[in-house]
Amino acid sequence: MTNTAISESLFREAKELIPGGVNSPVRAFKSVGLPPRIISSGKGARVTDADGNVFIDFVCSWGPLILGHAHPEVLAAISATMRHGTSFGAPTRLEIEMARTLTEMVDSIEMVRLVNSGTEATMSAIRLARGFTGRDLVVKFAGCYHGHNDGLLARAGSGAATFAIPDSMGVPARVVEQTVVFPFNDLEALDQFMEGQADRVAAVIVEPVAGNMGVVPPKAGFLEGLRSLCTRHGAVLIFDEVITGFRVAPGGAQELYGIKPDLTCLGKIIGGGLPLAAFGGARSIMEHLAPVGGVYQAGTLSGNPLAVSAGLTTLQILRRDNPYADLERKSSALAEGLRAICTEKGIPHTVHRVGSMLSLFFNPGPVTSYEDVMRSDREAFSRFFGKMLEQGIYLAPSAFEAWFVGAAHGDEEIAATLEAVRRSL
Ligand SMILES: *Cc1c(COP(=O)(O)O)cnc(C)c1O
């Protein structure tokens, strides 16, 4: 048994001071029924907890750390930038360089605005889409997460289109009435709805590869279908690439699948481990933002120099080193290994992988929607999670979060992980 005395005592203290002891709910390990580890440090593919236990980390700060923890070049960039001051609330060269890099890397982005979190990016993109179209309704898909904005905290009832009900207390029903939820990967229902209500739909927002209900890839034709429906009915197609951006390809899922959205939301990797996010797209839409246009959007710390230098350095390293083929190879080895071990042990499973994001569902599949995802064996995942943690593998503490492989995971880490999987299962 690994020692957890210090983590447990610190977590008791945290719970007295912070609701649930955490600053974001899933960190509390509630769904796996264990006390969370208090993390003291990270280096490369590994994190160390307060008791000195070392783990191979597949959470990677929930996606941002594609280069691993404490990457020396990223740390050096932050340190060099901070000597000149930490925030000005005025334009800087770094922001311009970041904006140029984003327009070069992400095909559909002609102009971009920086914000501080993915939640802010989707909130602002939706306001912009509404301002641009003069319409109110927003279409989203069940199981897609777009941050904790009131209007997006809604999923579908079963089956057909449902006007959404809030997922959280404190969200007015009036607010989510403007959100319509459809099943992921189901074009038919949306097609019919758009025929009838198209002149009311401002935007369709989607995770092009769903990453917040485990990894669920788009079926062939799904993203193409969304593109043509939006074009036909004058709605703004928003790709929420907060996870997939710079992850599944340098230019995100839109590069991988060859689909051009009108607006793109970026987060996570873009900040290299500091708080940074962005939304961008066609000039003709982006110029509706204040101070050019009438859609208000602002932020005291937006474009913060430290966050921009960490993010920019991360993107520059990704462009320079082009680790994507290597990520593909390692992630594929991990996914194949998971499948082989489950098959060998007769465990019903579905392993999904797109690039370096993957997930293991204890579910015979197919898994193409939120409903399918919910049929997975969560009890089995909790037991699996606990056994993996005991063996020094830090997975996301939920059956429905992605595993992230990064440049810092070597063949040795993949092999050690599969060995732990074999013992755990
Ligand atoms: C994480 C995430 C968000 C929210 O980003 P925050 O920085 O946590 O606000 C939005 N969309 C997707 C797809 C995400 O994975």
Image (cartoon, rainbow, N blue to C red):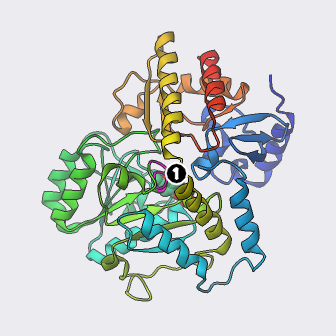
333 w.r.t. 191: above or below: above
46 in magenta:
no
Residue at screen point 36% across, 35% down: 371
Magenta stretch, overall SS: loop
Q: Position of residue 356 (x, y in %)?
A: 50, 41
Residue at screen point 84% across, 29% down: 3
Residue at screen point 65% across, 64% down: 310
Q: Quarter of the image holding residue 175?
A: bottom left
Question: Which residue type does callout 1 highlight?
Answer: Asn
Along the line of sight, the residue nearer the viewer: 234 or 339: 339
Give, as a single range, the part of the protein colored magenta.
Answer: 242-248
Drawn side of residue 205 relative to residue 243, left or right: left
Q: Quarter of the image holding residue 302?
A: bottom right
Q: Position of residue 274 (x, y in %)?
A: 65, 62
Judge whether residue 173 can be spotted in this image.
yes
Q: Which residue is mark 1?
A: 322
Residue at screen point 68% across, 60% down: 74
